[in-house]
Image (tube, rainbow, N blue to C red):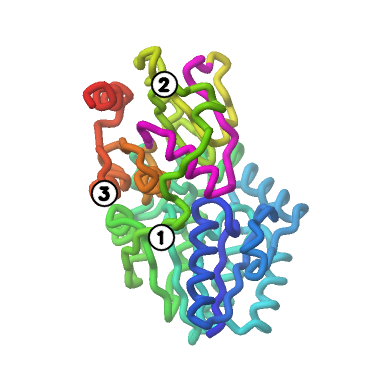
Amino acid sequence: MRILIINSVCGIGSTGRICLNLAKQYENEGHIVRIAFGRDQNFPADAERFAYPIDEKFEFWLHALRTRLFDGHGLGSRHKTNDLLKWMDDYSPELIWLHNIHGYYINYELLFDWIKRHPDIKIRWTLHDCWAFTGHCAYFSAVGCNRWISGCHGNCPNKLKYPASILLSKSAANYIKKKAAFSGVRNMQLIVPSNWLKELVEQSFLSEYPIEVQYNQIDPGFVRTKSELRKKLGLTDKTIILGVANIWTENKGLKDFIKLSKLIGRDQHIVLVGHIRKKPRDMPDNITCIAPSLSVRELAEFYSIADWFVNPSLEETFGMTSVEAALCGARVIVYKNTACEEIAAIYGGIAVEQNAEAIYKIIQSV
């Protein structure tokens, strides 16, 4: 069987690693697999045989500009999307497995028009966030918005959040476009990584499709790993509280880590792995910031030296970092009323109220 996986990245980041592991699994079963992806050509060597890059920097930036000014995310990249669709005509996939189709690299209207013209192809779509059924945003829990249930309208309260638009808000029009594009696919099944997300999808216009919960597969490289990392960081005599994110934002918990840093003692230290786009000028001395690592081995080292792994994110549909940390031996703390609470119950984490003081109390009590 010829299988095509489509995602924003290949082999890097949480969704990229999921796609690569899925491709390897299918290849081991004797299938032909390709991963079409849009961003970051720095994929690992073992992904090269699957990789079909569809990104073009000029069109990528035009797509990003259209998003930032006119709230037209997913409606650019027409030229490269048409190139992809011509390649798909030749490749003739029998199964297409969609992952993130947002990220400034593909035109979802053109893609789904092609899919609807090939009704015999099996379509699976793993939703890693909520973007597919809203008029703008990927997450809405932090602002408590439920407009997506009946149709987005007015100015989106998350207009400045990814995919950010600094000028116009077209959430109502985008909602109508997405509903028209994503509805009526003859042979599609949705995959979600948690029951928490399944309950949301069942309230959306995507409820016409069968929805299956499949917890994300974790790379087998995430095991307790010996290293000299504690010594390199100068933290041999400290209790390490670790946080990991691709990009640190307020909703990912950066603000709560800063609050936590003011509560912990001198024998405790916070390590944050990930990009911090707007690093506070007064970043506390007891927080060490590390650029994100693309290597599973390097990430496993950070997880393995952590006494505590804290995931204070308000907007997760699974929380892979929490599972990865638990498999490497760290004690895990997450917030209640998120998908992470569901995952923590399975992997042995602790769910607390959504504030830094609750995190601190658990750390001090153990």
Please give the range of residues in magenta: 283-312
Type of amino acid at the residue the image marks with label 1: Gln
Q: Quadrant of residue 142?
A: top left
Q: Is residue 191 above or below residue 330?
A: below
* Circle on res. 351: none
Q: Residues within 10 Å of mark 1 (few under 14, many from 20)?
A: some
Q: Which residue is mark 1?
A: 217
Type of amino acid at the residue the image marks with label 2: Lys
Q: Tag 3's secondary structure?
A: helix
Judging depth in this view, the residue of 236 and 243 nearest the camera is 236
Type of amino acid at the residue the image marks with label 3: Glu
Extreme residue in the right direction? 58
Q: Earlier in the sequence, mark 2 or mark 3?
A: 2
Q: CA distance from mark 2 to mark 1?
A: 32 Å
**Residue at position x 53%, y 70% from top?**
23
Q: Which residue is mark 3?
A: 342
* Percent x, y of residue 218: 42, 56
Q: CA distance from mark 2 to mark 3?
A: 30 Å
Q: Nearer the viewer, mark 2 or mark 1?
A: 2
Judging depth in this view, the residue of 114 and 149 nearest the camera is 114
Q: Is residue 110 magenta?
A: no
Q: Earlier in the sequence, mark 2 or mark 1?
A: 1
Q: Which residue is mark 2?
A: 238
Is 219 displayed left or right of 110 in the figure?
Answer: left
